[in-house]
Image: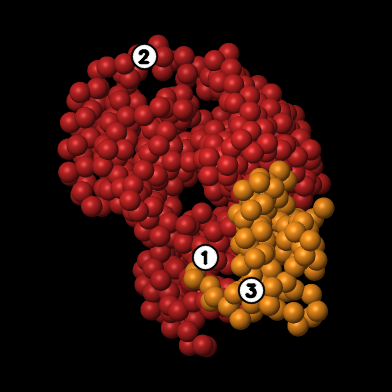
Chain colours: A red, B orange
Amino acid sequence: MYAYDDFDTQLVAERVAQFRGQVARRISGELSEDEFKPLRLQNGLYLQLHAYMLRVAIPYGTVSSTQMRQLGVIARRFDRGWGHFTTRQNIQFNWIKLEQAPDALAVLAEVGLHANQTSGNCIRNTTSDQFAGVAADEIEDPRVWCEIIRQWSTFHPEFAFLPRKFKIAVTGSPNDRAAVRVHDIGLRMVKNAQDEVGFEVIVGGGMGRTPIIGKTLRKFLPKQHLLSYLEAALRVYNRYGRRDNIYKARIKILVQELGIEAYRREVEEEWAAIKDGDLRLPAEAIAQIAAHFAPPHYPERPTRPAAFLEALRGNIDFARWHARNVAKHKQPGYAIVTISLKSEGQPPGDATAEQMDAVADLAERFSLGEIRVTHEQNLVLPHVAVADLPEVWRGLAAHGLASANIGLISDIIACPGLDYCALANARSIPLAQSIALRFNNWQRAERIGELKIKISGCINACGHHHVGHIGILGVDKAGQEFYQLTLGGSASDDAALGDLLGPSLDTEATVDAVDTLVETYLSLRQPEERFLDTYRRVGLAPFKEKVYAAH
Amino acid sequence: MAKAPKLVSNPQIVTANDLASGDVVYLTKVNSWTRAIEQAAIAPSLEHSAALLAEAEAQARRNIVVAPYAVPVTLETGNPLPVQFRERIRAAGPTAGIGAGPGE
């Protein structure tokens, strides 16, 4: 893992001191709300439906056990005992008091955590593959480049007031787990004909009210040019992006209006002028960052230990969990464990302080002290010896963290919705709970197989509904909560936007409609087809017919 | 939010967030702020809520609260109950999960 050096530590400490002064001046009245709001947002502090909310950055989703424990401290000491992991691999605390926010940030700074780049029209916290560095299918560890982007983008003076926020995601694997095609810039690590590793640069993807799948800006960018190329891409956006209309201010609109060719010409022209300047990355600098992400020392462990095989044979619950939540590790004898934060009845992504402590303890004992946060609102223990899996599973089960549902219908992404969010039109959490309850028979869920439901409480699409296999969007219809369904979206390497099923439905009818969609799929599917595959083969009509026949 | 109906003829109360704590608060008859919606001062209609709102905005300028606005309510149960769903959740707390209810 990357460890903060003196420079990083000083930067964060100075920021806390600066914000402490700003909060004091706000409370004493020296600063008006209009003057203060942009300052608090630059420190991740929002005013939400009920209270102030603090969004803490978890850069590229990697967090140490020490840091996870400190998140538990924040939950206990400054909040109401829990936090909410978000679709951008961050964590939100819902009940932070303004007068205590500087203290909370100081406690976070003790372990190298902060709220920088979690709000405002800057380059936001870069996201990545939660399996980075351990995935068997990976070309290279993308976190090296996420960290290089972090160092370049943090408080970048030219990009502090962009037309709108700017989100970058990086994947090192051809199996995209970081949704790079729906980001302002998505970077895919690829090999060229000479077998050199570089980046495919994808631009102008995004969700919100104008969902767009990103377009390839450059098929192959050599590594040493990453920052100069990003700088050129951002500079063109900063110059031409619209500032007169918040709904047309993201880079996706600029790329759409200019056209990808014209935007590319501008970027290439800008890049030509700066590519061999200060931002050209020397090999030593890359190596220095890469050293932080060098594979840890893995003590040799058996690949098929007897106790593990015995547990697989003798314990159906363990076997199910293993089948769903454990992924292949690149190191023989090790496995990647995904911890579901989607236990029945709990809001997706929520974790109590006790659960954070439990995960931190398990990471310390069994995962080399490392944890990941996923954009699908789960956690990951990236380095678990196969022989330790039964004990890790028991440890998770003791804290309600052993739901065996990764990738299944109850592994739902949901934004906080109208229960917490000032922008929402409808609630997301109770709908997610109702759907999970409807499908709580695990045999049925297994039979359905991979099905990604994503719920947003408004058009801003924090719940990624556009790219759900089944997407659900909350709308306000004459003061009542209604939901629009879309089918066939995907955030993966086969990225696609969902198609609107038909008129919106009330909450109960929405749960029934999901049931009908699932039954329709089961009746139509061919062997090995996922819901998404069947949908792509047969189209919207049979699903639409079944859902609206009853209405 | 979608454009809510104006509900001009409904009784109105005035809400804001406490500056230092962020808590949801309501303006009382004696121009103080309460976390208990049943203690909120009630104007008989939107037209009559101007004085309450002016007082709330003055207190916002004095940095006691932030972002005050009027909330249409009904009085059918005796206590003010917001008409809009959003405002009911804001008054009663999240409806689901670990944080359901008004909290501490």
- The lab-note entry on whether marks 3 and 1 share a chain reads yes
The chain identifier of the residue carrying mark 1 reads B
Judged left or right of residue B39, residue A17 is: left
Q: Position of residue A283 (x, y in %)?
A: 36, 14
Q: Could you tell which of marks 3 and 1 lies nearer the N-terminus? A: 1
Q: Mark 3, residues whose alpha carbon is within 10 Å: few (<14), some, or many (≥20)?
A: some
Is A434 in front, or is B86? B86
Q: In this figure, which residue is indicated by the disc labeled 3?
A: B48
Is A246 in front, or is A465? A246
Residue B34 visible in the snapshot: yes
**Tag 3 near tag 1, CB within 8 Å:** no
Is label 2 in a helix, a strand or a loop?
helix
Q: Name which residue lies at 51% across and 30% down.
A: A133
As displayed, is residue A388 above or below residue A179? above
Q: Which mark is residue A283?
A: 2
Q: In this figure, which residue is indicated by the disc labeled 1?
A: B1
Check disc 1 and give the amino acid type: Met
Q: Name which residue lies at 35% across and 14% down.
A: A282
Is label 3 in a helix, a strand or a loop?
helix
Q: Name which residue lies at 67% across and 32% down.
A: A24
Is A341 in front, or is A524? A341
- The lab-note entry on whether marks 1 and 2 share a chain reads no
Check disc 2 and give the amino acid type: Ala
As displayed, is residue A350 above or below residue B51? above
Count of numbered circles on the image: 3
Q: Name which residue lies at 66% across and 45% down.
A: B63
